[in-house]
Amino acid sequence: MKELRHLNKYFLKYKGKLLLGIIITIIARIFLLFTPRLIRESVNVVDQFRKGGLSMQEVQDELLQDIIYIIIAAVIAGIFTFLMRQTIINVSRFIEYDLKNEVYQQYQKLSLNFYKQNRTGDLMNRISEDVGRVRMYAGPAIMYSINTVTLFVIALIYMFNEAPKLTLYTVLPLPILSVAIYKLSKEIHKRSTIVQEFLSKLSSSTQESFSGIAIIKAYGLEPMTSTSFNELASESRDKQMDLVKVRSLFFPMMILLIGVSNLMVIYIGGKQYIDGEIETLGTIAEFIIYVNMLTWPVATVGWVTSIVQQAEASQKRINEFLKIQPEITNNNSEPTNIVGDIEFKDVSFTYDDTNIQALKHVSFKLIHGETLAIIGKTGSGKSTVLDLIGRLYDVTDGTILIDNKPVEDINLTSLRDHIGYVPQDAFLFSDSISNNIKFGKEEATDEEVIQAAKYAQVHKNIMGFSKGYETVLGERGITLSGGQKQRVSIARAIVKNPNILLLDDSLSAVDTETEEKILRHLKEIAKNKTTIIVSHRVSSAKNADKILVLEDGKIIQQGNHQTLSAQDGYYKKLYLEQLSETHS
């Protein structure tokens, strides 16, 4: 149960509602337990009539009164049972809401390394399936536990006061049940953990298949992926069946328990009645009803135990992520005003997951309003420069200064608020085009959105859709072409009007004519911004104030277009190659 201690803070948060639920549960059980006593009285009345002690009219009056009391007690018990569910089950929903938010907030804090090392399907499973199982513990399991304990305590007090010896015989099978439940619970816990792990694997496999469905279809891989999924699903089914086989032992045990208890009541109670140890026949009827009333609570012991074991397994998986400390932390709680001066001082960076050194002793300086272009082969470290400016990673060696302050000392929220970032792989959400552009600035007006789209040369494309800017995109923006997705991403960065604009090869999917138009608008927009453009094309870099050429993480050339195009080296060679391609 130690993993479930994480929920104690939520139980304390809603302790008022839980306490009210416990009180309501006790009241409901008290009224429910009026029924066996009233039935005992009714049987005794009939028995007295049979012996000639009461007249028919007296019997009818007594039975009618007992029936009315039974109905009233049942109605009151039903009302309080409804209120019990409304309080305790509602608390479980509040806890589920709080826990999902806690998990989601933790996901938001964790660095990119975390997402490289964990599969999306597994992360989704923990915030949905695992949290759902924990909710079952926080609601139904607790409710039925309180219900069972309350019913047992009150019923046993009534039974013991009425017939102590018969009560002992009636509850005799319970210790055997307790031992069996303990042993089964351990096995359920072990198998529940395995089942949850396989559910995560299934979720991850499914998510990856859906995300890459275009590739699967293009390469005709449907049979292979289906076979792979079937194998995983079959293994998951086998693990589920292993769990079900253990859990299925509970209810037969319950039936056996109740049957033995009823036999005890009839046999022992009958002998005691004959021997005069029990004064009335109604007591036997009362005990039989008590035993049968305890059937469901006793049955829920196994069910609740199973829920608790599964919840602990799920909470353990959740706790594993909640205990991870974010690699990137906000070291300054005070908002910081960002102008946009950027300086790299002997910066080196190595990726933890691959141990690849992406940057080696990189140094450069940009003044607010300047534009820097970074050119280089794939894997030369260009995108890493942009990631480090936004503190998606922290440097391994060296220092990055923003406005002459170490980037680690700047308020992280303020830093990212002042950055407009267009990634190499344009990501759009399954929402309207307008909202995708406004993602950079939620309060942006329609006029600002349209103007940003015009600057990004995507306005005409958007107006070509039947619903224009209100067109809802498919997952990851699948409705749009690669070039359109890039231009919508550029519009998103423009509408934000940031002081620092980072473009990571964001024009690779557009034609040269459109590229020229976008670059002209960007030059106008970038007058008061610090802009860094990563590209494979000289056409995107030639108008920049400064150009860096990276190779294997090192700066091998730097200068402006005029200087570098006149020097022998990578830039001049690339420039001449692309120039000849343009004229051919």
Image (cartoon, helix red, strand yellow):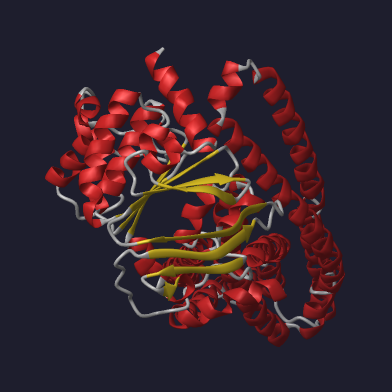
Q: In the image, 286: left or right of 214?
A: right
Q: Quadrant of the N terminus?
A: bottom right
Residue 502 versus residue 516 in the image, above or below: below
- On the image, the x and y values in percent for residue 146 come to 60, 75
Q: In the image, 569: left or right of 167?
A: left
Q: Residue at x 62, y 42 (%)?
A: 203
- On the image, the x and y values in percent for residue 352 come to 68, 58
Q: Residue at x 78, y 63 (%)?
A: 262
- On the image, the x and y values in percent for residue 529 come to 27, 56
Q: Nearer the viewer, residue 128 or 182?
A: 128
Q: Residue at x 61, y 78 (%)?
A: 150
Q: Nearer the viewer, residue 487 or 12?
A: 487
Residue 289 versus residue 246 in the image, above or below: below
Q: Nearer the viewer, residue 85 or 230?
A: 230
- Residue 500 visible, this angle: yes
Q: Nearer the viewer, residue 27 or 286?
A: 27
Q: Which residue lies most toward the left here? A: 447
Q: Which residue lies most toward the top here? A: 584
